[in-house]
C-alpha cells in the first residue's frame, strides 16, 4: 500500500528526510516512533502528497506520488490531480481541526458532499454509521466545543473514514489529549486495525505499538534507523540510538 525508496526531502538547506525506505503491506499497521524533529510528520506529509519529495520514489496503492507515468516517462501531476489522489488517504492530526461552527455530523458529511458530490441523504446515513462506530451516536448534533478532546478526535477519525480511504495516516493522534482520554481514541484505532485498515501511525503509545502494530519503525535525523516486529524492536533494539530513545519513553 505504501512503498517508499530512497526518499529525500529538504526544506531550504535542511535535509529532513535522508533516504527513507519503507514498505507497508495492505492491512498492516505500521507504527513510527522517534525523537522530535526526526522527520516523522514530514514522512506522513510526503505519503499524503502534502509535500513534494526531492529524490527517491514514493508509491501509494501502486501509484507514484506526484507523477504520472506514460510511455516510460514521468510527468509531474497538476495540483488538481494531486488533490484527487489525496482523497484516497485519510489523515488524522494531533490537533483535531474540526469546523467549529458545524456539528459532529456536519463535520463528517462535509467532504463527501462538497468534494465527492455524494447526495446529502446518503452522506448523512454513512455519517450516522461512522459516528456510531466511533462511539458517538448520541453526540452527533454536538458542536466541537461541546465535546471532549477524545470525542473530537473520534469525530476527526469518522470524518476521515467518510471518504472511504484506502490508507489512514495518524500523526500523534493522542498527544494533545488528557491521559484519561487517550484510551478511547486508541480503542477506535484498534477497531479500525481489526477491520483490516492499512494504517501508518506516528505515536509514542508503546502499548498500542506492541499490541496493534505489525511493524515498528524508529526514525532519527531523517532516516529509518531500525524497523521490525514491535515486540522484537522494543525488547531487543539493535542500535544504540534506538536503545537511548526507548530508555526515555518506556
Ligand atoms: P517530527 O514530526 O519527527 O517531530 P518533522 O517532520 O515535523 O519532525 O520535522 C523535521 C524537521 O523538519 C524539523 O527540523 C523541522 O523544523 C523541519 N521542518 C518541518 N516542516 C518544515 C517546513 N515546512 N519548513 C521548514 N522546515 C520544516
Ligand atoms: Mg511531528
Image: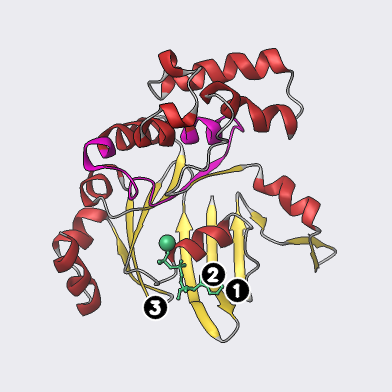
Q: Residues within 10 Å of mark 2 (few under 14, many from 20)?
A: some
Q: What residue sits 56% from the left and 20% below the top?
A: 127
Dot 1 crowding, Cα within 10 Å, few <14, some 14–19, many 20+: some
Left or right? Give the position of 88 relative to 177. Answer: right
Relative to 166, residue 135 above or below: above
- What is the C-alpha distance between the residues marked 2 and 3? 17 Å
Residue 108, x across and y down, in percent:
57, 27
For marks 1 and 2, the one nearer the N-term is 2
Secondary structure at numbered mark 3: loop
Left or right, 59 with reference to 237: right
Left or right, 83 with respect to 44, comes to right
Magenta-tinted stretch: 156-182
Q: Position of residue 67 (x, y in %)?
A: 74, 62
Q: Is residue 167 magenta?
A: yes
At horizontal 79% and vertical 60% (from top left) the residue drawn is 77
Helix or strand or loop: what does disc 2 sit on? strand
Residue under label 2, please give it. Answer: 5
Label 1 belongs to which residue?
56
Q: Is residue 209 visible?
A: yes
Q: Residue at x 78, y 56 (%)?
A: 79
Give the vertical position of 19 relative to 188 (above or below): below
State yes or no: discs 1 and 3 in contact (Cβ < 8 Å): no
Marks 1 and 2: CB-CB under 8 Å?
yes
Task: State the separation of the CA atoms marked 1 and 2.
Answer: 6 Å
The quadrant of the image that shows the C terminus is bottom left
Question: Within 10 Å of the Cα at label 3, are there few (<14), some (14-19), or many (20+) other Cα atoms?
Answer: some
Query: First in sequence: mark 1 or mark 3?
Result: 1
C-alpha distance separating marks 1 and 3: 17 Å
In-front residue for pair 190/125: 125
User: In the image as oriented, which residue stretches furthest toward the bottom?
Assistant: 13
For disc 3, the marked residue is 221
* Residue at x 52% of width, y 25% of height: 104
Amino acid at each position: 500500500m505504501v512503498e517508499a525508496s530512497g526518499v529525500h526531502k529538504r526544506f531550504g538547506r535542511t535535509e529532513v528526510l535522508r533516504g527513507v525506505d519503507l514498505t507497508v503491506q495492505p492491512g498492516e499497521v505500521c507504527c513510527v516512533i522517534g525523537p522530535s524533529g526526526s522527520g516523522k510528520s514530514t514522512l506522513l506529509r510526503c505519503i499524503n502528497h502534502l509535500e513534494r519529495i526531492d529524490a527517491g520514489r514514493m508509491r501509494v496503492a501502486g501509484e507514484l506520488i506526484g507523477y504520472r507515468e506514460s510511455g516510460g516517462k514521468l510527468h509531474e501531476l497538476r495540483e488538481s490531480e494531486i488533490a484527487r489522489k489525496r482523497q484516497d488517504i485519510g489523515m488524522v492530526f494531533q490537533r483535531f481541526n474540526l469546523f467549529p461552527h458545524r456539528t459532529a455530523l456536519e463535520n463528517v458529511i462535509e467532504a463527501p458532499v462538497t468534494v465527492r458530490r455524494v447526495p446529502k441523504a446518503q452522506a448523512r446515513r454513512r455519517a450516522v454509521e461512522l459516528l456510531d462506530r466511533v462511539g458517538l451516536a448520541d453526540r452527533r448534533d454536538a458542536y466541537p466545543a461541546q465535546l471532549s478532546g477524545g470525542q473530537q478526535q473520534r469525530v476527526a477519525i469518522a470524518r476521515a473514514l467518510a471518504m472511504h480511504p484506502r490508507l489512514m495516516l495518524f500523526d500523534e493522534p493522542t498527544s494533545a489529549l488528557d491521559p484519561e482520554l487517550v484510551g478511547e481514541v486508541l480503542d477506535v484505532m484498534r477497531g479500525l486495525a481489526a477491520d483490516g485498515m492499512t494504517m501508518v501511525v506516528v505515536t509514542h503509545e508503546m502499548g498500542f505499538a506492541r499490541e496493534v502494530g505489525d511493524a515498528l519503525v524508529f526514525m532519527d535525523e531523517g532516516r529509518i534507523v531500525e524497523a521490525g516486529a514491535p515486540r522484537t524492536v522494543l525488547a531487543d533494539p539493535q542500535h544504540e540510538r534506538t536503545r537511548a530513545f526507548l530508555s526515555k519513553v518506556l
